[in-house]
Every structure is written in C-alpha cells, then in structure tokens.
Amino acid sequence: MTSMGGSLLLDAEPLVRAVQTSGMLNKTLIQICANDGLPKTGVKLELQQRIIERIRLYAHTGNVERFNKLKGLILNPPTSSSGAGSPYHSGMASSSSPARTGPAPVPSPYISGLGANRNGYNMGGGANAYLGFGQPKGIEFKSSPFFDMEQQLGETVTMDAMAHHRNNAKIVLKAQDYPILGRIKNDPSLKVMIFCAGENKGPQDVAFPHQSEIKVNTGAISANLRGLKNKPGSTRPVDITKDLRLTPPTYSNTVEMTYALTNKVDGNSSQKFYLAIHVVKTKPIDNLLAEITAGRHITEKAVLDEMVTKSRDPDIVATASVLSLKCPLSTLRISLPVRSLACRHNACFDGESYLQLQQQGPTWLCPICNQSAPFRNLVVDDYVLKILKNTKQSTDQVTVQPDGKWEDKKQETNKKENTRYNGVASDDDDDLVEITKNGDNVSMGAPNGYLSQPQRSVSTSSAGRTQGSTSSKRPIADVIDLTSSGDEDEGPARTPKRQQTNGYSTTSIPAYRPAPPSNAYR
C-alpha cells in the first residue's frame, strides 16, 4: 500500500530535466551512478540515460526512500571522497545480485545514445516485469548497419535447455507502457523485432533454437529462424511490427516462442537461449550507399601504383587481363564499384546489390575472393569508377594492361569493322535477284532499292549469253541459260514452282517463238 500511495507523490520530471540540463561532467555522473549501484561505463549520454531510468523506476514503484536518496545525489552531487564506500551504496550492493555489481557490458556499437536501454528498465506493469535489482541483464547483440537499437521492450527471457521436450517462452507487451510504440504509426522506420541469442556474454549473433516457432497474439509468424546453413550470424531478427495491436493502448500483446532441441553444434550438450524484444530504427539502403560514397575511397593513383609494382616483380610475368564491369551477384553492370579493404584483386562488385543480399542473409563475405567484407570495410574503387564513367552502358568488360592502361576491345573491333565495310552493301544484298521477261528476252538483276547496277539480258535462243556487270564487292553468279534442254545436267532437274507469265501457265520457258500478237495481247 505504501508503494502504491507513494507513487502519486513522486514527480520524476523535475529531476529528469535537472539531469539533462544541469551540465554535470562525466566524473559527477559516474559518481552518482556508483552511489546508486549503476554501471559506470559509457559516454555522457549513456550515463545520463541510466540515471533518468532509475529516477523513473523509483517514481513509478513509489520507492520514496531511494527516490529521495537519488534526488539528493543529483541536487548535491557527491565529491570524489564520498562515493562507492557510502553506506547507501554498501546496502545496495548487499541487496543486489553479484551479477549486478560486476562491470556492465559495453554498449552495442549500433545502439544510439538516448534511445539505448541497457539496464533493462521498462514500464511493463507488475513487479516481475522490472529488470532492476537482481534481474537478468540485457543481451548485447552484434552491430548491424541496417538498423540502430532504440529501446528494449519487456524483460530478457531465459529459455531453459530442452534436449528432448518442448517448452514455451512468453513476453507480454502493452502500448501504454512504452511511449515509443506510439511513434511507430508516424515513423515507418521504427520496427519491433524479436532477438534471440545462445549466450549472454559479449556481443552475440542472432540465433534461435533449432526447432522453434513464434506466435504473436496466437497468430503464427512466418520467418526464417535458421539463416544460411553453416553460416553463423546469417539469421535475421524477426519483424513483428504489423502483428502487434497498438490500439487500444491497454491491449496485452502476447509474444510466445515454442522451442525444442537446444543442443549445441557438437551435439554433446544442450544450451540456454535468451529471448528479447527491441524497437529498432531501420536505415534504407540508399542512405548506406551515400555513407559508403562519402567514406573511404581507393584512389586511381593507388591502384595504378600497385599495378606497376606488380608488373616489375621479376618472379611474375605480367600480361594483359580482362576486367569485368558486371556485378557477380546481379550479373548487371556495376553502378557503384566497391570492394573490401582486405581484397587484393582489382575486380569490384556493385554496392547496392551487395547490401541487398546482406539484408536478406548477412554473411559479409566478398563474392569474388570470399574474404571478410563487413560494411565498415567497404570502399569505393575510383579506378573502376572512372572506367565505368568513360565507357558505354553496353560495355561489360575492358582489357587492362600491366601498367594500368585499359581499352575497350569490343569498341575498337566495331570501329575497324565500320571502317572496312563503310559504303559497301551487305552480303545479303547479293542474294536478291529480280527476274523479268520482256518479249523474247529474260532479264535478271538486283532490285532497284539494293544495288544500282545495270540489268543483265539474255536471249531465249541458245545462241549466246550477255555478260552482266558485277558488284563492286563480288560478282553475281553466272547467268543460267533458261533455254537449255537439261541434257547436260548430272541429275534430273528439279521442277520449279509454277509462274504466271503473260497469260501462259508453264513449268519452263518454251523453246519456240510465240504466235503473232493478237488483239488480246498487245
């Protein structure tokens, strides 16, 4: 009853403003943390946030004694002589668990200052929801360039080892207990994600039990909880933002995980897992590409110097090489050529394609040499970037000489072919022949639209042939005497298709003269 009544009398906000605006030095903040049993590591913003969370915890639980003690520490900061050895601190240390008095974990690199909730404080309704004294610490997860940690929701749940049987872990969330959830509607970059780890010391990869299933408000969540085979760290946290009911704010969202087979990789022992829910702020890939572009570059001069040095090595025979301008991941032309600082090759991959792949399953390995290529080690290659800017979009590779000079072989070949065949008709034009008949003569020649050469005429009699003019590129085949009887052919002549000529339907040109013209034929 005391704690419930006291909560109405404790106003935390004036103390919160005092911590934020008093301009206290790190040394003073560290002394306040030490007197209240809080971790003393971190930058100024983290120390302030730690103290603010403790103020609100005491106010919410109605702990008048500890609230007033902390208030006195803030309004009258302790000197260096008073501190860890104060009676208050000693009493706190004796009442807390040994793990609580040990050094605090180093904040995760991707946890942003004031949004970080590394002490486990939350407004989760009920004494068991607080991670204050004697409660498990938050788990630190390895950094990711795709999001920043904002705040942990609820407590970190320890999932007991289950070698054979199934077990459940549950976390209940209410929107009214976490003001940050009210910002999700207007800020699409905020996501609620489920994290899980197999250890609780040091930065951890996201890892779920071998057999596990997640349900939010009794609805099954479809997600890949295993990642890539034999690729630790390739598992992503599970986004449950759309599955939570944030209105009404009093609604209790139940997040439940059913799991089994928590055996370690060696299979000889089982392990515990640790479940936590965090609000994260996601970063679009475009922003990451802009960060890479504004970051480190491998200059063109550095690349050329390295090539020249290698070409002078007496143990290496330097020859020209082909440099692909296509990304090995997307097989499309590279837009932003990047590679890792650990790479020893000149070939690059496309930055956007690489980040899209890592967003789906983070392995952070170079697709060319399989060396480690984390985001912080990605650099832009100015040498390849210049080649991309000075070649056509259709160019997919160039030839690089040992001294670094490059040329587009395909473009050079096209220029030579254009010079060689400039003004010359295509080979296909020679196969187009027009056959006409005018009285006793049959004429053969190219159509007017293709070759401007005189038609060749041949008499229907067997007396002779006229030599037609030839193309400037190559001669047309000899004219065939259509009046021949075909006795000289090696085999039977193929019957040509029927042609309609001057009213006669024939299969060959007749060897006799036609009848004198009549009124019907003029």
Image (cartoon, rainbow, N blue to C red):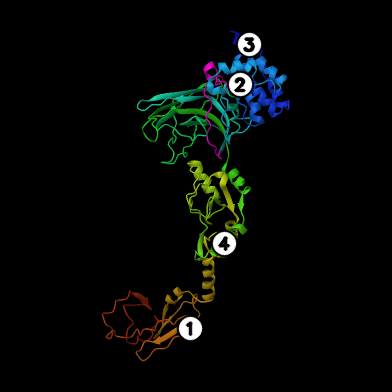
Residue 263, picture quadrant: top left
Q: Earlier in the sequence, mark 1 or mark 4?
A: 4
Q: Which of the two discs, 3 and 4, labels the residue nearer the N terminus? A: 3
Q: Residue at x 62, y 55 (%)?
A: 299
Side of 81 relative to 283 (left or right):
right
Q: Is residue 380 above or below residue 83?
A: below
Of discs 1 and 4, which sits in the foreground?
4
Percent from the top left, x then y, of residue 470?
A: 46, 84
Distance from the alpha carbon under mark 1 to that under mark 2: 107 Å
Tell me the residue that label 4 is attached to.
Answer: 309
Q: Which residue is mark 3?
A: 6
Relative to 495, is 168 above or below?
A: above
**Which amino acid does the dot numbered 2 rest on?**
Gly
CA–CA distance in space, label 4 to label 2: 59 Å
Residue 130 inside the magenta-drawn segment = yes
Q: Secondary structure at mark 2?
A: loop
> Mark 3 packing: few (<14 Cα in 10 Å), some, or many (20+)?
some
SS for tag 3?
Answer: helix
Residue at the image point whose x is 66% and y is 30% from the top: 45
At label 1, the amino acid type is Pro
Residue 405 position in % (x across, y down):
57, 65
**What residue is disc 2 on?**
37
Q: Amino acid at mark 4?
A: Thr
Residue underneath mark 1 = 454
Distance from disc 2 to disc 3, alpha carbons, whole Å, reads: 22 Å
